[in-house]
Image: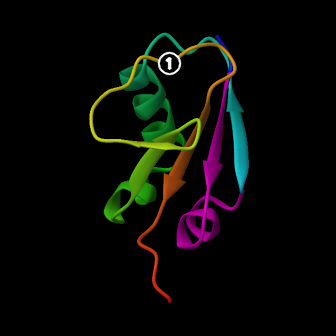
Amino acid sequence: MEVSVLFFGVLADVTGTRIRHYNEVRSFGDLRHRISDDFPELFHYNFRIAVNNEIVDSDPVLQPGDEIAFLPPFAGG
């Protein structure tokens, strides 16, 4: 399946991109491994993960066309 991965804030700076598409993703663990291979420095940062605009705390079941966002800590008011 194909999914889109969005990077925000400092994570976009670290990866050098705001969006990346991954094909033939079998699971969230597979996607995480592939992102780690592409951007190993990313995992030195704190971030949350959202799937289709919903924050997730565990390994979600992905569906074709899902949008996964890597979100750094937010500040402001």
x and y percentages locating residue 71 in the rendered image: 49, 59
- Residue nearest the viewer, comparing 22 with 53: 53
Q: Is residue 2 left or right of residue 72?
A: right
Task: Between residue 67 and residue 76, name the one nearer to us.
Answer: 76
Element at label 1: loop
Question: What residue is at 55 percent from the left and 73 percent from the top?
Answer: 10
Which residue is found at the position 44% from the left and 57% from the top?
Answer: 42
- Up-down: is 35 above or below 76? above
Percent across and percent down for residue 12 are: 63, 64
In the picture, which quadrant includes the N terminus? Answer: top right
Q: In the image, is residue 45 part of the stretch drawn in magenta?
A: no
Residue at image coords 51%, 52%: 70
Q: Is residue 14 magenta?
A: yes
- Relative to 7, residue 50 above or below: above
Q: Whole-percent x and y of residue 17?
A: 72, 57
- Using the rendered view, name the quadrant where residue 48 is placed: bottom left
- Residue at 38% x, 24% y is 60
Q: Which residues are magenta?
A: 3-17
Residue bearing the label numbered 1: 62
Q: Which residue type does callout 1 highlight? A: Leu
Q: Measured from the top left, where is residue 20 in percent x and y?
A: 70, 41
